[in-house]
Image (cartoon, grey):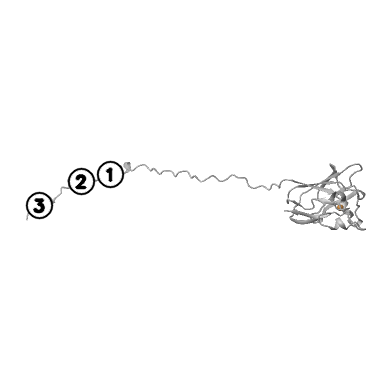
């Protein structure tokens, strides 16, 4: 039986074919490598996130200083016979704020402290000036009134007006550190009755009132 020559491959032809295939593979590899486009990894767009706020950390700045003006009216001025009065009687201030109470007094009558309250001659819980002069206490014989807030440790003292003067000005500076509503009193016996503790001294809105620290 005849064998078809077509079925035979010469060894040389087989080697040549493999070589061609190998070269093609290399070319293919090269082509593949060269044709692959460069990585165009587009850099991610810069984040548009806002930069962190550069707001400075809160500081513990004290509240602004406050000025509160009070008038100390005599009985005649206050409109009720014989009753002296602080006007206004109720005031509000801010905790942590330096407060300057300016008290203008028109009272030329004295009301010396009783021995039990003699410590109220001393200025306490703040600094006081009398007509601009720094003062640490007022001699008892010259005291007309006090502006005292025991709950705040405060005591300002108001002397009588000097002879020939219409008024005396006391400036008292303090910085309240607690909040609440506290009662202030005058401790000089400037009211009615044999002990001077009645009338204006026993009536809210006259020789006592409220100071609210918010
Ligand atoms: Cu008084």
**Is disc 2 in contact with disc 1, using a CB cutoff of under 8 Å?**
no
Residue at 23% x, 46% y is 21
Q: Secondary structure at mark 3?
A: loop
Residue at 92% x, 56% y is 115
Q: Which mark is residue 4?
A: 3
Question: First in sequence: mark 2 or mark 1?
Answer: 2
In this figure, which residue is indicated by the disc labeled 2? 17
Image quadrant holding the N terminus, namely: bottom left
Q: Secondary structure at mark 2?
A: helix
Front-most of 167 and 29? 167
Q: Position of residue 202 (x, y in %)?
A: 85, 58
Q: Position of residue 95 (x, y in %)?
A: 73, 51
| Apparent side of residue 61 relative to residue 100 in the rendered image (left or right) | left
Spatial CA span between label 2 and label 1: 16 Å
- Characterize the local packing of mark 1: few (<14), some (14-19) or many (20 or more) Cα atoms within 10 angstroms: few
- Characterize the local packing of mark 2: few (<14), some (14-19) or many (20 or more) Cα atoms within 10 angstroms: few
In this figure, which residue is indicated by the disc labeled 1? 28
Ligand 1 closer than 8 Å to label 1 CB: no
Question: First in sequence: mark 2 or mark 3?
Answer: 3
Front-most of 26 and 74? 74
Q: Nearer the viewer, mark 1 or mark 3?
A: 1
Question: First in sequence: mark 1 or mark 3?
Answer: 3
Q: Secondary structure at mark 1?
A: helix
| Apparent side of residue 144 relative to residue 101 in the rendered image (left or right) | right
| Apparent side of residue 29 relative to residue 174 in the rendered image (left or right) | left
**Is disc 1 in contact with disc 3, using a CB cutoff of under 8 Å?**
no
């Amino acid at each position: 039986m005849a064998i078809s020559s077509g079925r035979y491959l010469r060894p040389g032809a087989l080697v040549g074919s493999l070589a061609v295939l190998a070269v093609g593979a290399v070319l293919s590899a090269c082509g593949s490598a060269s044709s692959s486009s460069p990585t165009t990894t587009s850099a991610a767009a810069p984040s548009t996130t806002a930069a962190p706020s550069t707001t400075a950390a809160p500081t513990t700045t004290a509240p602004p200083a406050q000025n509160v003006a009070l008038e100390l009216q005599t009985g005649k001025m206050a409109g009720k016979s014989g009753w002296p009065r602080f006007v206004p009687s109720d005031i509000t201030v801010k905790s942590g704020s330096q407060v300057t109470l300016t008290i203008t007094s028109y009272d030329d009558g004295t009301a010396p402290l009783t021995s039990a309250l003699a410590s109220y001659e001393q200025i306490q819980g703040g600094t006081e000036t009398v007509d601009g002069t720094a003062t640490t206490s007022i001699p008892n014989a010259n005291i007309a009134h006090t502006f005292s807030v025991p709950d705040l440790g405060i005591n300002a003292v108001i002397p009588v007006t000097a002879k020939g003067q219409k008024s005396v000005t006391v400036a008292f500076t303090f910085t309240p550190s607690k909040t609440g509503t506290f009662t202030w009193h005058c401790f000089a016996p400037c009211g009615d009755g044999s002990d001077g503790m009645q009338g204006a001294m026993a009536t809210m809105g006259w020789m006592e009132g409220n100071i609210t620290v918010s």
